[in-house]
Image (cartoon, grey):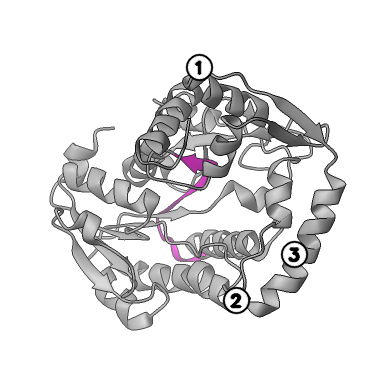
Amino acid sequence: MQPNELLAQTPVLVTGASGFTGSLLVRKLVQAGAQVRAIARASSRITHLEDLPITWFRGDVFDPTTITQACEGVEYIIHVAAAYRQAKVSDDFYHQVHVGSTQLLARAVADQANFRRFVHVSTVGVHGHIAHPPADESYPFDPEDMYQKTKADAEIWIREFADQSGLPLAVVRPCAIYGPGDTRLLKLFKLAVGPVYPLLGKSKSLYHLIHVEDLAEIMIQAAIHPAAQGQVFIAGNPQAVTLEQMGRIVAETFGKKLRVVRLPAWPFFALAAVCETVCKPLGIEPPLYKRRVAFYTKDRSFDTRKLRDVLGYQVKWSEEKGLAETARWYRDHGLLRV
């Protein structure tokens, strides 16, 4: 469906608009003619969006006053905001950002007659390790850290609330988000162009990606497509890739050969546990996390056919094209030496 035809002059509220995904999303919404509103903390940088006609509400996404003001008369909400995984982030803060904000937003619009749809952005992390890949939207929840647990709690709550209240809802669970401007996968890119590319354990280390351009368009389709009502969508490319394949794409982008070295995983898990035990009480970022080690050892592969079968959406960015483009962006911005 064409967003320009449905979103022109329509008030749309985006949370997390100043972040990597949210920034691109609000640009696409503005291009579609929507009247974009956005919530951003007072400390959030928004200078990169100053060229856009966005109505900003500065405050915490779990602040009742901010939510009430931002939601008045809005017709769509795309709830992207999330708490960063950092040692200094408390369990309570994760709950406020993920669960508390979701509850406030949903209740604020549940009785608004002109409200059309709430797009709740969750994560495939709610599924945890995929014992029998690929997993679809019905796969059991098994979150492994407080970020994933509170994301799961928020999704469970809003789906139950929508059933009870009639709130129009669609849920999007993104796979690993990447693209120019993001740095979450930068360490992997650096290893791929380095002297050796370490892989832990003997698993395939399946990983599922979604380019930020595709994800932003999927979110918009989840908002406006009639068939998205009441549905959950795993947002990812059609196939998973292995970490070795990812490294090879990056290395070959610069004419390099990937040199894989396999190491046992258990010493890294043990070291990560020690790092977290020592560093977290001090509010210091551990040099190694258990979840970071798990990144190299667990399979996260998903069946994403529902995007095509229900939304009619075909991803535009293959892994080869997207990873190569991102690698060149890192190099051009001085983040990757090749």
Q: Secondary structure at mark 3?
A: helix
Residue beneath disc 3: 275
Q: Residues within 10 Å of mark 3 (few under 14, many from 20)?
A: some
Q: CA distance from mark 1 to mark 2?
A: 44 Å
Q: Mark 3 or mark 1, which is nearer to you?
A: 1
Q: Position of residue 80 (x, y in %)?
A: 41, 56
Q: Quadrant of residue 246?
A: top right
Residue beneath disc 2: 90
Q: Which residue is at 36% across, 37% downward?
A: 213
Determine if the magenta segment contains residue 304.
Answer: no
Is 114 displayed left or right of 127 in the figure? Answer: left
Q: CA distance from mark 3 to mark 1?
A: 36 Å
Is 24 displayed left or right of 183 in the figure? Answer: left
What label does residue 296 carry, if any?
Answer: none
Q: Mark 1 or mark 2, which is nearer to you?
A: 1
Q: Secondary structure at mark 2?
A: loop
Q: Mark 2 or mark 3, which is nearer to you?
A: 3
What label does residue 255 carry, if any?
Answer: 1
Q: Say which of 258 and 165 sits in front.
A: 258
Of the numbered discs 1 and 2, the one sitting upstream in the chain is 2
Q: Quadrant of residue 176?
A: top right
Q: Position of residue 236 (x, y in %)?
A: 52, 35
What range is drawn magenta here? 164-178
**Marks 1 and 2 in Cβ contact (< 8 Å):** no
Of the numbered discs 3 and 1, the one sitting upstream in the chain is 1
Do we see residue 113 in this rendering?
no
Quarter holding the N terminus is top left
Do we see residue 83 in this rendering?
yes
In this view, 95 is above or below 158: below
Of the numbered discs 2 and 3, the one sitting upstream in the chain is 2
